[in-house]
Image (cartoon, helix red, strand yellow):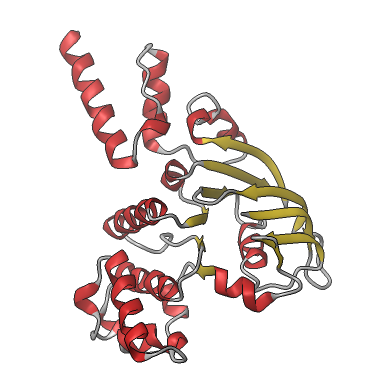
Amino acid sequence: MINIENVSFKYKNSDYILKNINFSVNDGEIIAIVGKNGSGKSTLGRLIGGITKLKEGTITIDNINTAKDIKAIREKVGIVFQNPENQIIFNNIYDELSFSLRNLEKSEIENRITDSLKHVDMCDFKDKDLYALSLGQKQRIMIAEILAKNPKYIILDEPTTMIDSYGKEKIHDIILDLKQKGYTIICITNLSDEILLADRTLILDNGEIVAEIKKEELIDKHDILEKYGIKIPTLLSILVALKRKDIDLHVADFSVAELTSAIKEKLDTERKSI
């Protein structure tokens, strides 16, 4: 479990970017953190991942204080950033994935690389040139690199912002698959469809958490998203419209793909009844 208590943060000579942040992330959850640009989302992710040093408040991960044992935290938490090209060190995919594993036995390195590539459906690219890949494929390799380190928690900081629609769908499938395998995921995002992947959505505004919405509450509380300038996912808008016609589909009962099919079926049924 991740616990964030009374966390505030500011850079030198700046106003507070985060103000008295308090929330927990349960094991096996997907949490979406959303908000306008400048709301403090990425800074919060960096604090949880131990990349930025915490100065005020407490973050504990499995009861380990991030301020006291940063090495243990970095073994537990992996973070993937928005632009995969900023994270690449080596041209060759095998070299990239094996670099942080170099202290392990060769057989263990091979097993971890193979398993991580399976997670992201990139096994056939093991010996390929990273720079020959599409941006979406590069991001999947960056996720594989984190998985090879065997973390318990994964922070995805706007992982699909720069990627085309096909690449987004692939990464969304990976996120849901990782949850099924027991990973805990914090998804920092500006893309509305990724809200539908999450068990809970936290809205940051001006450095403060102003709302928390559970997945099953999204239809009834969609106006809160709008209030804080968060674009409503298209699928959610359709569900809201259907509910106004007394047609209920519960968002929590479906994956994104299943929800799309269920909405289509309901709409087809309604057209036939007209």
Residue 140 image-quadrant placement: bottom left
Residue 107 image-quadrant placement: bottom left
**Which x, y percent locates residue 138?**
34, 74
- The residue under the point 62% across, 44% down is 203
Does any portion of residue 119 appear in the rendered image? Answer: yes
Residue 30 vs residue 193, the one in the foreground = 30
- The residue under the point 61% across, 54% down is 1
- The residue under the point 63% across, 67% down is 46
Residue 48 image-quadrant placement: bottom right
**Which x, y percent locates residue 223?**
56, 29
Residue 39 vs residue 88, the one in the foreground = 88
**Which x, y percent locates residue 264?**
23, 28
Q: Is residue 170 above or below residue 258?
A: below
Q: Is residue 243 left or right of residue 15?
A: left
- The residue under the point 38% across, 36% down is 234
Q: Is residue 108 left or right of residue 14?
A: left
Q: Is residue 69 left or right of residue 171?
A: right
Residue 18 vs residue 254, the one in the foreground = 254
- Quarter of the image with the C terminus is top left
**Which x, y percent locates residue 257?**
28, 41
Please count the marks in the image.
0
> Of all residues shown, which one is farthest toward the left?
272
Q: Is residue 125 above or below residue 218?
A: below
Q: Is residue 10 left or right of residue 210?
A: right
Does any portion of residue 206 appear in the rendered image? Answer: no
Q: Is residue 131 above or below residue 247?
A: below
